[in-house]
Image: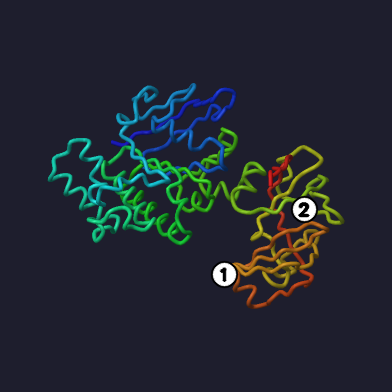
Amino acid sequence: MSKQLVLKNISKSFGSLIALDKVNLTVEPGEFVCFLGPSGCGKTTLLRIITGFEFQTSGDISYGDINLNNVIPQKRDFGIVFQSYALFPNMTVSQNIAFGLTMRKMPKHLIYKRVDEMLELMGLGEWKTHYPSQLSGGQQQRVALARAIAIKPNVLLLDEPLSALDAKIRVRLRAVIKRLQQDLGITMIYVTHDQEEALSMADRVVVMREGQFRQVGSPWEIYKKPKTSFIAEFVGTSNFFEGRKKGGSVIYGQSSLKVSAMDTVDTETVYLAVRPEDIEIVGTTIAKESCLASNIIDAKAELITFLGPVVSITVNLEGKELTVDIAQKEFAKKPIALNDTLHLYFPPDAFHVYSEIFRKLI
């Protein structure tokens, strides 16, 4: 029977460096959780603590009613898939998949049966006698996945397993991993710095920064309701601008924008974030009579980028660059040219309001 994996006040220090700072999480049986964050945020350290390759400085980790604090990796019965595949070069695909089963001294006829199941599940049947050097990166990663799943682990842990692959192969393997997780009902914890990967795969996303959990929620919550300006910037794309609070509006340049979420801040200076796809173009994506007059601002189109399903338009809004995304179908109906003046509409409920702004290092 599947059990909860519980992390309670997990901290980890390397000398004076605090890698993890009292993080708490309960992972439900059969749940797919992604740890998402920039390099150095502590996500891989946390995964290593869950596997037992690293021990926390303080806090408790348990699986069901078993405390794992001092349990070695081999006894935790967790499957692990690394970024580097870590396949044995002198073993065939079948032998690599069988490795964990052989180490557990499973009877040979059951090993053969389980390996055949994995080969079929991962679409590797015709490659079973090949060696890793004869496989593509995507095939090698599928072998690594099959080897990890073959032992029927309680929890499957994946450390940026797709980051070394080409973009199209990554997308295909994302679908393979998600389907596997759903079909097998296995608990998965997946580490990535790729927000698209996290949003497309996870049941819950844990956004990490500087060793802390900054927001935990469904992909929809993380994207549509980012709690901080860091999350609004890191997950997806946001336009930011600074204004002055005045009642339920924000004064920005010559405009007084009506903003729905003004009760969330009590500072005079406020920072607004708005997703590029939430900005409307009057006469193209929205009719003028559907707009609040105060929230229409004119801006000049300075750059037009075709991205397939979406056309991204960079505009100059009172000296600041903003990006507006519209569907390619809408653009085709009424094309926009460079230097066109656009009437941009900012719906009051499209704004995220913050009292601080995340400053990128680059």
Residue occupying the point 70% across, 50% down: 273
Between 264 and 38, the one nearer to me in the picture: 38
Location of residue 114 in the rendering, given as x and y in whole percent from the top left corner: 20, 48
Q: Residue furthest right?
A: 254
Q: Front-most of 225 and 98?
A: 98
The residue that label 1 is drawn on is 308
Task: Say whether residue 106 is left or right of residue 212.
Answer: left
Q: Residue at x 65, y 41 (%)?
A: 228
Determine the image quadrant of residue 134: bottom left
Density class for disc 1 (Cα within 10 Å; few <14, some 14-19, many ≥20) is few
Residue 238 in picture, x, y percent from top left: 66, 53
Check the image and tell me how it is coloured. rainbow
- 263 or 195: nearer the viewer: 195
Image spot of residue 241 (x, y percent) = 76, 50
Alpha carbon separation for disc pair 2 and 1: 33 Å
Residue at x-position 56% and y-position 23%: 15
Residue drawn at x 64%, y 78% is 333
Dot 2, how many residues are within 10 Å of its Cα: few (below 14), some (14-19), or many (20+)? many
Judging by the rendered image, the residue that carries numbered circle 2 is 258
The x and y percentages for residue 317 are 79, 60
Residue 118 horizontal side relative to residue 361, left or right: left
Image quarter (top left, top right, bottom left or bottom right) of the N terminus: top left
